[in-house]
Image (tube, rainbow, N blue to C red):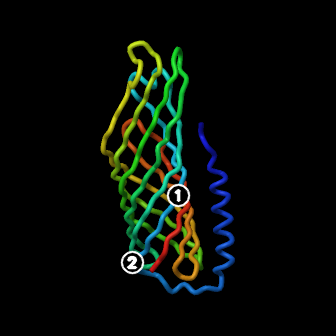
């Protein structure tokens, strides 16, 4: 069952709004150097085009919580490079098909690198990023009772690569604390399609 991201977005918007009022009078002199941070998000993906599986149960649209930890370097207030460890969680669930039912699970985690462009507007920032995601992906589909297909009918454990594109909006407080809302689209291959993540993250700029 899909879960709504609206509570997450509402909470993040309240935090950013409150933070912006608190930081209006602060200077913005910290324009370069390293930073570290972490984020929590909502990962959504479709499982489709799986031989002998989607013919029976159709495409699967699933989601789960995700988290990341990252390190970056700001060359100036407009350009930075970033390296992330990204765990996209373990989307899983049950399904009902003609004459049978079963369950599925996806497990995705790995490392990514980004080039990030930022447009500062006082203490606010708009950003866009492009990068690459090197990841491990596990996909399992199990039928409870479909004759010869009883049990596990699909198990993959592969390494993958994907382009990642994103946009964000954030606010910086006391020159060091950066709070950010982001949307990322991941061009995953094989049976995983329309993968995207909404992130809420915080970073400390040294």
Mark number for residue 75?
2
On screen, residue 135 above or below 77: above
Place of residue 182 in the rendered image (x, y in percent of width and height, measured from the top left): 53, 60
Residue projecting furthest to the left: 159
Q: Quadrant of residue 53?
A: top left
Q: Name the residue located 37 percent from the left edge and 28 percent from the top edge.
A: 154
| Image mark for residue 106 | none
N-terminal-most mark, 1 or 2: 1
Residues tagged 1 and 2 counted as in contact (Cβ below 8 A): no
Q: Which residue is mark 1?
A: 40
The picture places residue 41, in percent across and down from the top left corner, at: 53, 54
Please state the horizontal and vertical placement of residue 181, each as a whole percent of the image. Answer: 56, 62
Query: Residue 147: percent from the left, percent from the top?
Result: 42, 12
Establish if 112 lies above or below 45. Answer: below
As drawn, the residue found furthest toward the top would be 147
Q: Residues within 10 Å of mark 1 (few under 14, many from 20)?
A: many
Q: Nearer the viewer, residue 5 or 119?
A: 5
Q: Nearer the viewer, mark 1 or mark 2?
A: 1
| Callout 2: SS | loop
The N terminus: image quadrant? top right
Most foreground residue, 25 or 97: 97
């Amino acid at each position: 069952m899909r879960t709504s991201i609206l509570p997450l977005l509402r909470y993040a918007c309240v935090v950013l709004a409150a933070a912006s009022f608190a930081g209006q009078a602060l200077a913005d002199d910290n324009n370069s150097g390293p930073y570290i941070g972490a984020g929590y998000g909502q990962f959504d993906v479709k499982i489709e085009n799986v031989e002998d599986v989607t013919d029976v149960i159709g495409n699967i649209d699933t989601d789960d919580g995700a988290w990341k930890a990252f390190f970056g370097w700001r060359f100036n207030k407009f350009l930075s490079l970033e390296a992330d460890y990204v765990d996209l969680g373990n989307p899983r669930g049950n399904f009902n098909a003609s004459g049978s039912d079963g369950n599925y699970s996806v497990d995705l985690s790995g490392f990514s690198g980004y080039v990030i462009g930022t447009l500062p507007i006082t203490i606010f920032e708009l950003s866009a990023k492009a990068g690459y995601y090197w990841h491990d992906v596990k996909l399992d589909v199990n039928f409870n009772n479909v004759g010869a297909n009883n049990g596990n009918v699909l198990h993959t454990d592969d390494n993958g690569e994907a382009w990642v594109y994103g946009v964000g909006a954030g606010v910086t407080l006391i020159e060091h604390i950066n709070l950010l809302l982001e949307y990322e689209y991941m061009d995953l291959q094989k049976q995983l399609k329309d993968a995207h993540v909404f992130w809420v993250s915080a970073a400390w700029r040294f």
